[in-house]
Image: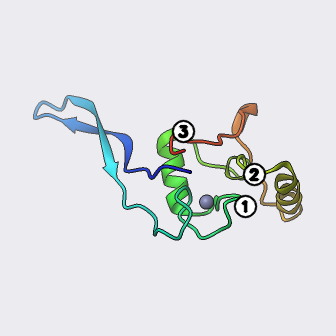
Amino acid sequence: MPKIIKELPSTVTEVDADGRATIKPMSWKLVPPPKDHCLVCARKHPPEDPHDVQQIYYQTCFQAMVGRPATWADAMAHCSDKIKRVWTEVLHKTGHWSEPPNGEAPVKHHGVE
Ligand SMILES: [Zn+2]
């Protein structure tokens, strides 16, 4: 069962009167998805299906936790091999397939599960 993300790590740059910039850690508070929606991507879908990589909630959380945009390979990393095969084939055929850069492994848990 995924945990709800309550805060996203980030940084803020403060500039003093002399123009010196200081980067400090900060975080963004998040409003959780509705109770009947997926807690990872904030869309209604069966838990065995891929997350919706086009959801702004999923992309924002993933980017903050992993440091790069989520891809379809990440969104289906938790799926069975059969579901991965079907979705991968359709996404390739429609030209929508995406995967992590530089041979990185897909990220199944981006700090929320
Ligand atoms: Zn989801």
Q: Kindly identify which numbered label has been placed on residue 39.
A: none
Residue highlighted by disc 2: 79
Towards the viewer: 106 or 111? 111
Q: Residue at x 41, y 61 (%)?
A: 32
Figure check: 105 above or below 59 = above
Q: How many marks?
A: 3
The image shows residue 5 at horizontal and vertical percentages of 43, 50
The image shows residue 16 at horizontal and vertical percentages of 14, 34
In the image, 20: left or right of 44?
A: left
Residue highlighted by disc 3: 66
Q: How is the image coloured?
A: rainbow
**Quick one: label 1, few (<14), some, or many (20+) residues within 10 Å?**
some
- Labelled pair 1, 2 in contact (Cβ < 8 Å): yes
Q: Does dot 2 land on a helix, a strand or a loop?
A: loop
Looking at the image, is mark 3 or mark 2 earlier in the sequence?
Answer: 3
Q: Residue at x 52, y 62 (%)?
A: 56
Q: Does dot 3 land on a helix, a strand or a loop?
A: helix
Residue highlighted by disc 1: 49
Marks 1 and 2, Cα distance to the nearest angstrom? Answer: 6 Å
**Quick one: label 3, few (<14), some, or many (20+) residues within 10 Å?**
few
Amino acid tagged 1: Asp
Residue 41 appears in which quarter of the rendering? bottom right
Residue 18 appears in which quarter of the rendering? top left
Looking at the image, is mark 1 or mark 2 earlier in the sequence?
Answer: 1
Cβ of mark 1 under 8 Å from ligand 1: the answer is yes
